Amino acid sequence: MVDHAAPDQPPRIGPNSITRMAEALTAHRGDDETAALFAAAGLAHHWTAPPESMVPADDVTALHRVLRARLDSDMLALICHDAGVATADYLLAHRIPKPAQAILKLMPPVLAARMLIQAMGKHAWTFAGGGRFHGEPGKPTRLVIADGPIQAAVPDATEPLCAYYAAVFERLFRVLVARKTTVRETACQAVGAPACVFEAVW
């Protein structure tokens, strides 16, 4: 079975963007509120049966739209951070081959960043849905997502929305590139930027 959408079908995205958010929401808000939030987003089916394969990218947008409306920004940022870290840990455990991880850890950071960005680009549809991803290794290293599903949740936002992506990138870079890496979103499409830009520094 092919998980990603065909060209004439709506974009799809990896299930971690749903399942890890559900786990983080449950940890911070409990089962009942999490179930209610998923139901409000029209995603009760994902709560009762967590997805194990690709899901419509619109599901991620719907979930984040409801969360933005119902949770305060600090709580949501914490939940997104925890979900992002959990997603990165899943990728490190199950998706990024251990030999490749060992090689990246031996490389100078900028070169490791270049190789990691190339690998991410090959699988960008798994985390960006129908959006576009590219990266620019350097000091700082820049990671860019345009037209992704999270920034689409609130197109007229007053603050950046993509703490989830920032946490995924930071965790991956800390493990594979440089331990002291920090990642922050310096521009967000939801507040009017052409794309969401994340800067990684170490």
Image (cartoon, rainbow, N blue to C red):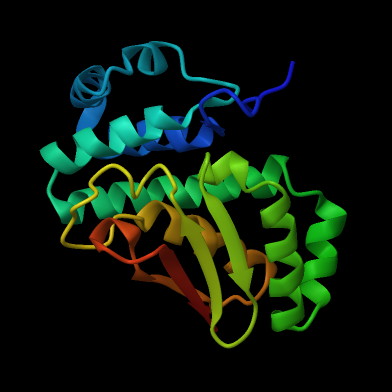
Check the image and report above or below for 118 versus 64.
below
Residue 185: percent from left, percent from top? 38, 68
Which picture quadrant has residue 104?
A: bottom right
In this view, the residue in front, 70 or 197, is 197
Which picture quadrant has residue 74?
A: bottom left
Residue displayed at 60% across by 40% down:
126
Residue displayed at 23% across by 46% down:
154
Asked if residue 33 lies left or right of residue 4, the reply is left
Residue displayed at 28% across by 53% down:
78
Check the image and report above or below for 135 versus 140.
above
Residue 175: percent from left, percent from top? 64, 65
Residue farthest front in this picture: 8
In this view, the residue in front, 34 or 166, is 166
Asked if residue 72 lies left or right of residue 160, the reply is left
Residue 11: percent from left, percent from top? 53, 31
Residue displayed at 39% across by 49% down:
82
Q: Quadrant of the N terminus?
A: top right
